[in-house]
Image (cartoon, rainbow, N blue to C red):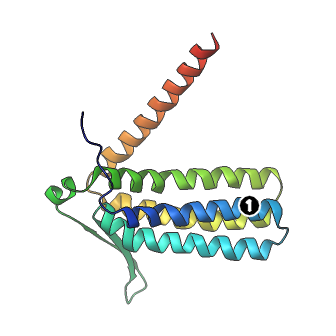
Amino acid sequence: MAEEENYANPLTALFCVLFKAAALVFYIVLASFINNFIIVFVITVFLVALDFWVVKNVSGRILVGLRWWNEVSEDGESIWRFESLEQQDLDRLNKKDSWLFWWTLYLTPVIWLALGIVALIKFSFDYLLVVAVALVLSAANIIGFTKCRKDAKNQIRNFATQTVTSQLASSLQTAFNRV
């Protein structure tokens, strides 16, 4: 029996998930039970900003060997900078660390989008602002890390294929369970 691979960087993996989960949980709980937009906004945006910083500056570098940043030149032009480990070093990274990083990176904005739709349906346009901030910061990290990754097109294609395949398998399993 093969031994299951552990996380090579469990503390980094924890913080990669911790601020995302905390922001989502605090937003949902505070928005549901506390009728004070200022508190919800400040706490949620603070946690989302912490998540953005940790993912961009720590998790990406340690878990997947990628780093990105944006500079503004003297003439006001925005310049994106990317760093990546060499392919042989990328191949040596822990698969579990990498899997966690990419799935949380792509899944979190999907959850925020769903919460945004709920805010729209409830006509809670102020809470939509919180969701917009979370989506913008998530999108910045997705764009930065996807551009940074040398095989970004294959990564996105594989992610989409796996998602569609698992969704289809789940739907088929549910359909057969009803029969």
- Nearest the camera: 110 or 28? 28
Quadrant for residue 45, please give it. Answer: bottom right
The answer to whether 149 appears left or right of 42 in the picture is left
Reply above or below: 80 against 2: below
- Which residue is rendered at x = 38% and y = 90% of the image? 74
Q: Indicate the position of residue 60 as horizontal and vertical percent values.
A: 36, 65
Question: Residue lying farthest bottom?
Answer: 74
- Which residue is rendered at x = 83% and y = 53% of the image? 122
The answer to whether 147 appears left or right of 140 in the picture is left
Q: Indicate the position of residue 117 as horizontal and vertical percent values.
A: 71, 50
- Which residue is rendered at x = 69% and y = 77% of the image? 42
Badge 1 element: helix
Reply above or below: 153 against 29: above
Q: Is residue 111 visible?
A: yes
Question: Badge 1: few (under 14), some or many (20 or more) residues near its Cα, within 10 Å?
Answer: few
Q: Which residue is mark 1?
A: 29
The answer to whether 123 appears left or right of 24 in the picture is right
Where is the C terminus found, in terms of image quarters? top right
- Nearest the camera: 109 or 35? 35
- Which residue is rendered at x = 27% and y = 54% of the image? 94
Q: Indicate the position of residue 31 as horizontal and vertical percent values.
A: 77, 63
Q: Amino acid at mark 1?
A: Val
